[in-house]
Amino acid sequence: MIKDCCLVFDVGKTNQKYFLFDPDFKILKRERIKVQKIKDEDGHKAENIAGIEKWMKDRFDELMQSEAFEITKVNFSGFGATWVHLDKDDQIITPVYDYHKEIAGDTFNLFYENYGPEAVFASQTGSKNLNMLNSGKQLYWLKTKRPKLYIKIKCSLHLPQYLSFVFTGEKFTEYTSIGCHTDLWNYETKQYHQWVKSEKIDLLFPPIVQTNKIVVKNFNQREIIFGVGIHDSSSALLTYLLKGKESFILLSTGTWCINFNPFSDDSLFDKTQINNGATAYMKVDGSPVKSSRLFLGEEHRLKVKKLIKHFKKPKYYHRSLEWNKAWTGKTFPASKNHFHWKFLDNANAPAQDDLDFPDFETAYCKMMMELIDLLKEQLDVICETLPKKIYIDGGFSDNKIFLALLKKQFPSQKIKAKPASFACALGAAQILGQDQ
């Protein structure tokens, strides 16, 4: 039997995974599933928290009964900008709203009248107005637009902390979840923003603890050490920060490509950076990290679906593509873009997709080139000088076309990718070994 193993539930926006690590952080067992979304009261998609919870409990029970390994530690990595609201009996009282939920355009007019100007507020909180992606605003929306529901909420937990609560029954708040563009934190005063206190929303939050806090619980007469959960992209960043002090930027790829620069000379943002998409995150100790983001994975998914249909290819055809230098160079006019994006900047895009390509391969390569051009703009926002190392983690770390084009875009940088990377889960495991 392998002793002292660590189980991590890594709950992503698109996929849900678990990883079982040995004491040297080697993977012993893993699983990847996709829990189907549900609908909220308005018919908008919402997170199926009951399905996620059942999957976690079932896998935990199965793994605890194994005679091949002994689990002594459990932690949780989860996506950000997502709340689980509990009533007085600790029951979930609202849907777990999707952070892209559309809400009335005038919802935050009074908010900025009271707590703005908007530009000043954005500088203080490290994020421009992203509506529900600023998850603190979800509570303001509930309070002002659905007061009968809001008044029933007695505790609001960030998703990673709710995943921990499922097993421990204990409630906490920690820095990486507070710090992912929530609009809750004032990076200038290093505390909850005044609006949170004025609206008394802070009364719904459990105490802030260090991300490495542990809770010991007994299961089947065995002591298990539980973590309090960690924001997934911040967890991925942690694994690279633990490697040493040499500067780098991290591209944590998946549904979003979140770009982290933890070595910026200036930790605060100016108006131009905020307007161009820069966002503040937090390290596990509460210190700020400059970041930017691109809805890379979602745009990629939508375009691949369209290209596969257009060129009549199998569903996952793009995953088998190898890099071919012939796809670049003279193949495309440098000044012409072919793709129009659903969520990204279309300033240099055509009014609709131009699919005048000889084959799927050429079209896919051109699509990736245009995405990487947009990615470069986001990196320029957060980097005064680009570090020599660029780490690629997550879903695009084994995409050969993406990596080849990235090297072409940044010829002076060393691009390091981990195929089938598991940094979000690894960081959650490693934090349990950090000093309290």
Image (tube, grey):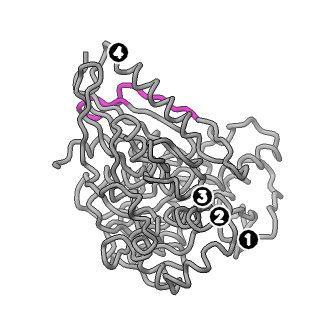
Q: Which residue is mark 3?
A: 148
Q: Is residue 41 left or right of residue 194?
A: right
Q: Quadrant of residue 75?
A: top left
Q: Residue at x 65, y 66 (%)?
A: 344
Residues at marks 2 and 3, CA–CA distance in whole angstroms: 46 Å
Q: Residue 349, labelled with which disc?
A: 1
Select label 4 or label 3 by which is in front. Answer: 3
Crowd band around label 1 with a 10 angstrom C-alpha radius: few (<14), some (14–19), many (20+): some
- What residue span does the magenta drawing correspond to? 20-34
Q: Quadrant of residue 316?
A: top right
Residue 155 painted magenta: no
Residues at marks 2 and 4, CA–CA distance in whole angstroms: 48 Å
Task: Check the image and report above or below for 80 versus 386.
Answer: above
Q: Is residue 409 visible?
A: no
Task: Check the image and report above or below for 429 versus 149.
Answer: above
Q: Are marks 2 and 3 in contact (CB under 8 Å)?
A: no
- Check disc 3 and give the amino acid type: Lys
Q: Which residue is mark 2?
A: 370
- Check disc 1 and give the amino acid type: Ala
Q: Secondary structure at mark 3?
A: helix
Quarter of the rendering occupied by the N terminus: top left
